[in-house]
């Protein structure tokens, strides 16, 4: 009994100390280490939109109206909020696109962040008009301040050009039989780039423009990029772009928005590059296949995907890995999909599975991303769209919207506690093996992360409507085994080789086990 009390006390004493020592300390000079961090699954990624991150909505109508005294998000007013991220255990910021956006045939009153309108200019909407610096200088200041806090910075680069750009630079775009620039899939506000010329060679102008975009981002201090829909461009295109970036910075990170199960969204207009070829081209990682986690009903659905990602990583000598994608800007809020129980499960899957955790701005307090102005006629518009276009329950990338934040303030405390546990148990959760555990109930997900004699065991109910109970088989576990609860509502019953659990819909339980050999 004394040893158990000592260990629990030791855990509590170390949690705060280890969080401070986990690599977030301020740095006087910056040396990019993002590739190493990401490949080792040590990145904790927080995605945000500068356009809304520091916004001030004075009349609380969710839309930002500068003419009415509201304040749009800028690089400058984002700086004071950076310390909030470090306090939550974040070490990597992922900025949704910061490049200039198109205004013609647009979606939303400010234009989609993904309607790329310039390879070399940042979005003027992100400029502080009261600051004499240029928007590029302000961006560099923001990134420098992030670096001082130990925060690495990733920037998202769009995959397609705006309609405006298709008029200005027609040689960069695929044309249909009527000579119109092609709309890919149902992305009506963008046009598809022409990767190959008429002779079947790479379109040199497109390659050069992407290289210019990379140079512009590196010049302001960016540490890596996430390539939007990377798979619609071929191996040889990315090989040139990545090699170019790595000549200046060998640690410059490349994450591909790609997945092993996704299908080609551009179909007859171009080929689709599989994940393994993107990794061969130089990408360090890709999205895990978690977009539809709320549709999973069986443990095997999760285990199969984790094993698939680990197999790919092993094929590349464990020098490639994944980024979690349970709750990105492309998915509905987990609060909309499954409420607080799904939020808790997604949080702990992020923290305990062998991947880089990813959290979207507003997630920590349970934002449902439902806006009061949703699809209503716009009072004012910066584009040719007269409506506040949004996807219900999804992060707004089309308008000048409020700062993301939910009504579940208690979740922030739960999030921070979970993050503290992640850093305390980092030798297990980062270096430990992934061990699937069997159950007699197919709805019960169970796995362990094991390093030496220590293990973290995660048990979750994948059934979103019904409680589940059953046995989880853990070889050599017995009543006298040291089982320390990390996250649970009802304690399990432990007998030789079995853990008996009762779980509410989407409930997740987490335990520390000591000296259990499995």
Image: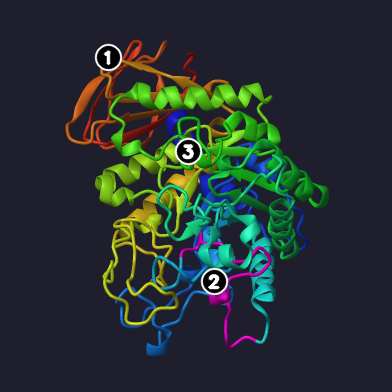
Task: Give the quadrant of residue 40.
Answer: top right
What x and y, as percent, mark residue 231?
56, 39
Residue linked to disc 2: 78
Q: Is residue 426 magenta?
A: no
* First in sequence: mark 3 vs mark 2: 2
Give the quarter of the figure containing the N terminus: top left
Write the residue at 44% across / 72% down: 110
Q: Which SS class for mark 2?
A: helix
Q: CB atoms at circles 2 and 1 under 8 Å apart? A: no
Q: Earlier in the sequence, mark 1 or mark 3?
A: 3
Q: Which residue is mark 3?
A: 267
Q: Closer to the camera, 407 or 229? A: 229
The stretch of residues the image draws in magenta is 112-131
Question: Which structural element holds mark 3?
Answer: helix
The CA distance from mark 2 to mark 1 is 49 Å
SS assignment for the magenta stretch, majority: loop
């Amino acid at each position: 009994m004394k040893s158990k009390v000592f260990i629990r006390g030791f855990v509590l004493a170390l949690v705060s100390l280890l969080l401070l020592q986990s690599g977030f300390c301020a740095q006087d000079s910056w040396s990019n280490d993002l590739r190493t961090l990401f490949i080792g699954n040590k990145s904790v990624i927080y995605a945000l939109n500068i356009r809304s991150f520091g916004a001030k909505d004075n009349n609380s109508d969710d839309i930002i109206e500068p003419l009415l005294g509201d304040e749009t998000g800028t690089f400058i007013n984002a700086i004071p909020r950076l310390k909030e991220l470090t306090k939550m255990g974040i070490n990597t910021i992922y900025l949704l696109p910061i490049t200039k956006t198109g205004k013609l045939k647009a979606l939303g009153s400010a234009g989609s962040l993904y309607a790329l309108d310039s390879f070399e200019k940042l979005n003027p909407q992100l400029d502080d008009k009261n600051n004499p610096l240029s928007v590029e200088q302000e961006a560099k200041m923001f990134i420098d301040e992030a670096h001082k806090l130990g925060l690495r910075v990733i920037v998202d680069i769009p995959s397609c050009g705006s309609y405006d750009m298709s008029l200005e630079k027609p040689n960069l775009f695929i044309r249909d039989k009527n000579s119109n620039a092609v709309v890919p899939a149902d992305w009506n506000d963008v046009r598809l780039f022409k990767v190959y010329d008429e002779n079947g060679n790479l379109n040199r102008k497109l390659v050069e423009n992407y290289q210019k975009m990379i140079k512009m981002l590196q010049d302001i201090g960016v540490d890596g990029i996430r390539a939007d829909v990377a798979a619609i461009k071929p191996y040889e295109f990315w090989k040139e772009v990545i090699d170019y970036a790595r000549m200046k910075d060998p640690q410059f990170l490349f994450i591909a928005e790609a997945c092993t199960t996704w299908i080609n969204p551009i179909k007859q207009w171009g080929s689709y590059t599989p994940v393994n070829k993107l990794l061969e081209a130089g990408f360090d990682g890709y999205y895990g296949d978690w977009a539809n986690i709320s549709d999973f009903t069986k443990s095997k659905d999760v285990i199969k995907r984790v094993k698939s990602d680990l197999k790919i990583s092993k094929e590349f000598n464990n020098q490639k890995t994944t980024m979690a994608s349970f709750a990105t800007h492309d998915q509905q809020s987990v609060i909309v999909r499954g409420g607080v129980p799904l939020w808790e499960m997604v949080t702990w899957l992020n923290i305990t599975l062998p991947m880089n955790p990813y959290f979207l701005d507003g997630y920590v307090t349970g934002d449902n991303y439902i806006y009061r102005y949703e699809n209503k006629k716009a009072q004012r518009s910066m584009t040719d769209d007269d409506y506040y276009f949004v996807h219900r329950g999804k992060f707004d990338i089309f308008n000048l919207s409020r700062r993301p934040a939910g009504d579940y303030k208690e979740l922030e405390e739960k999030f921070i506690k979970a993050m503290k546990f992640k850093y305390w148990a980092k030798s297990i959760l980062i270096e430990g093996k992934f061990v699937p555990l069997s159950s007699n109930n197919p709805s019960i997900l169970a796995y362990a992360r094991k390093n030496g004699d220590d293990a973290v065991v995660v048990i979750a109910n994948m059934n979103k409507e019904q409680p589940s109970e059953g046995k989880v088989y853990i070889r050599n576990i017995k009543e006298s085994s040291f089982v320390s609860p990390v996250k649970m509502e009802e304690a399990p019953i432990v007998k030789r080789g079995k853990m008996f659990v009762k779980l509410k819909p989407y409930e997740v339980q987490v335990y520390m086990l000591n000296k259990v050999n499995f």
